[in-house]
Image (tube, rainbow, N blue to C red):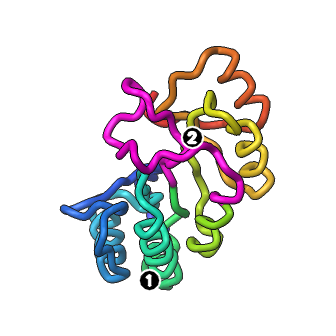
């Protein structure tokens, strides 16, 4: 692999949103080739909070693109920024509130199944009920936990770090 930038959060590129309907394997490959040509040699396609049908479709599409020998090595894994974030103003940002979920290991396991095990980073709000349990679940499965889109207290943050959170989205 050539020298270049690594981007852990790419929500989309060239008019394509990884969390929008209609994402195709060819489009993910095209985006990957374009990023490489501009100096980003590895990245994590990122899906923000979305409905279940988008997750089911787009996680599978990105995972299929990752299997392509020509571009797959440049896709480090999927970053899910949500849906386990705070639904409150000041934290939610551009995420659609109607699709925010409380932290749930079973829901994550379903997402990971749709992604063929390719979810590598999960951004969540540590103050949400069940967040610490989910953080431990994710860490045991080798997923990096990033804290973001939250209104956490210092105590919430400490509990999340103690449970295994190591990254922060949107510092």
Disc nearer the start of the sequence (1/2): 1
Find disc 2 in the rendering and name its residue: 124
Q: Pick whichever, 76 or 142, lies toward us.
A: 142
Question: Label 2 crowding class (10 Å Cα cut-off): few <14, some 14-19, many 20+?
Answer: many
Q: Is residue 8 left or right of residue 117?
A: left
In the image, residue 31 sits, relative to residue 121, either above or below, namely below
Pinpoint residue 31: horizontal percent, then vertical percent.
Answer: 30, 69
* Tag 1 residue: 70
* Residue ID at (80%, 53%): 140
Secondary structure under the numbered disc 2 in the rendered image: strand
Left or right for 19, reference 110 = left
Task: Determine the residue positioned at 26% across, 60% down.
Answer: 13
Task: Identify the image quadrant of residue 141.
Answer: bottom right
Position of 58 relative to 44 (above/below): below
Q: Residue furthest left?
A: 15
Measured in 3D between alpha carbons, the distance from the residue under mark 1 to the one under mark 2, in whole angstroms, is: 32 Å
124 in relation to 72, above or below? above
Measuring from the top left, give residue 59's x and y in whole percent.
49, 70
**Which quadrant of the view contains residue 57?**
bottom left
Task: Provide the residue span drawn in magenta.
Answer: 80-108
Tell which tag, 1 or 2, sits nearer the viewer. Answer: 2
At horizontal 51% and vertical 53% (from top left) the residue drawn is: 80
Q: From the viewer's perspective, is residue 135 above or below residue 29?
A: above
Q: Measuring from the top left, give residue 18's x and y in whole percent.
A: 35, 63
What residue sits 43% from the left and 28% below the top?
Answer: 88
Which label belongs to residue 171?
none
């Amino acid at each position: 692999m050539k020298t270049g930038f690594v981007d852990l959060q790419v929500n989309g590129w060239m008019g394509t949103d990884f969390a929008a309907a209609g994402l195709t394997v060819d489009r993910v490959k095209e985006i990957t080739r374009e990023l490489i040509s501009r100096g980003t040699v590895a990245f994590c396609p990122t899906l923000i909070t979305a409905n279940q049908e988008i997750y089911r479709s787009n996680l599978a599409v990105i995972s299929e693109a990752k299997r392509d020998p020509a571009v797959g090595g440049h896709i480090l894994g999927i970053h899910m920024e949500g849906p386990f974030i705070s639904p409150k103003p000041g934290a939610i940002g551009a995420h659609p509130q109607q699709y925010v979920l409380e932290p749930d290991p079973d829901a994550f396991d379903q997402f990971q199944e749709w992604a063929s095990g390719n979810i590598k980073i999960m951004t969540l709000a540590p103050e949400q009920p069940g967040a610490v349990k989910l953080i431990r679940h994710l860490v045991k499965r080798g997923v990096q936990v990033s804290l973001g889109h939250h209104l956490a207290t210092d105590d919430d943050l400490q509990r999340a770090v103690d449970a295994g959170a190591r990254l922060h989205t949107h510092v």
